[in-house]
Amino acid sequence: MALLGLISTNYYYLYILHFTIITNSLQSILTHYQLFKSNKPNQIRKSNQIKSNQTTPDSDFVTCGSAIKLTHREKSGKNYYLSSGPHRINAGSGQQLVTSSPNKGEASTLWIIKEGHNADPCEPGSKIPFGTKIRLTHAGTGLNLHSHHAKSPLSSQQEVTAYGGDGEGDHGDDWIVNPAQGSSNYWKKDNEVFITHDGTRQHLGSSEQAQFGLNNCGRQCPVMDHLEVFGRKEKDSFVKWKTSMGVFLHK
């Protein structure tokens, strides 16, 4: 009987030991879980803080005072660049001709961003909010991108010219930039935009379907292989532009 009592006692202590180990393990798990729960909101807050601090660098934006190249991409995959020079349109208004050049290296493709006509000067290096009026002044000739109710020479859409002098012109020089897609607040590099004439609500456009060549411009054509630039009512692939090259100012 003493032996049986000893065995029973040993089993009892083994049971107690086993139960204690399990209990301690469960308590440890519970403690770690509670610590995890208490720390998780802090981790989420820290993660949200990191995300909120990841703002877009100012160098990604198009800014006032910058000299930019505006690029139009045709369905063929070829890029053309808004251009002007000391050439006059032989029809319509007779004002300075604006085209899309296939040559991105030409100095004639640089345009300086300014505030709208008679508006307060914009601060050099400041971001351009979508929906505000701007002027685009041709760097080489000092004339502003302009439009009015006259027919373009090749496609008979709305004429786009360069007008004024030394950056001075009239309300026909005002344009509004808006995103072609998305809901950004500011004009960003490499993003496609619509550039809309404020006075007539026509969108700046260009197309290989209206290209200067021998048949419509002659052998001495100063804009051979350039595309006509026009104003167009529809928002389609002909009126999308973006800018990634130029001299960008940043505060």
Image (cartoon, rainbow, N blue to C red):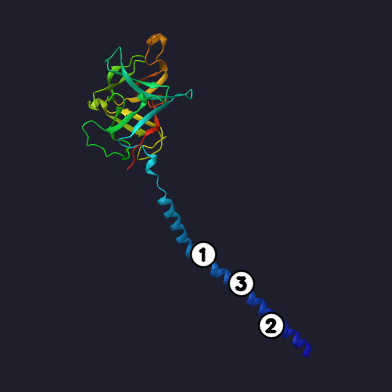
> What residue is shown with label 2?
13
Query: Quick one: which residue is furthest to the left in this view?
Result: 118
**Any mark on residue 26, and which?**
none
Horizontal side of residue 123 vs 106, given as left or right: left
Per the image, the residue denoted by label 3 is 25
Which numbered disc flags the more N-terminal residue, 2 or 3?
Answer: 2
Q: CA distance from mark 2 to mark 3?
A: 18 Å
Q: Few, some or many C-alpha atoms within 10 Å of disc 1 (few <14, some 14-19, many ≥20)?
A: few
Is 59 located above or below residue 94 in the figure? below
Q: Nearer the viewer, residue 195 or 243?
A: 243
Sooner in the amino-acid sequence: mark 3 or mark 1: 3
Residue type at the position of mark 1: Phe
Image quadrant in which you'd find residue 245: top left
Query: Measured from the top left, where is residue 112 in percent x and y?
Result: 31, 31
Instruction: Tell me if mark 3 has few (under 14), some (14-19) or many (20+) residues whose alpha carbon lies within 10 angstroms of its own.
Output: few
Q: Secondary structure at mark 2?
A: helix
Q: Which of the numbered marks, if any, corresponds to residue 36?
A: 1
Badge 3 marks a residue whose secondary structure is helix
Image quadrant assignment for residue 163: top left
Whole-percent x, y for residue 172 in the image = 25, 25
Residue at left offset 61%, top offset 72%: 25
Residue 46 seen from this side: yes
- Residue at 48% from the left image edge and 61% from the top image edge: 40
Q: Point out residue 187 in the picture as x, y percentages from the top left corner.
A: 36, 37
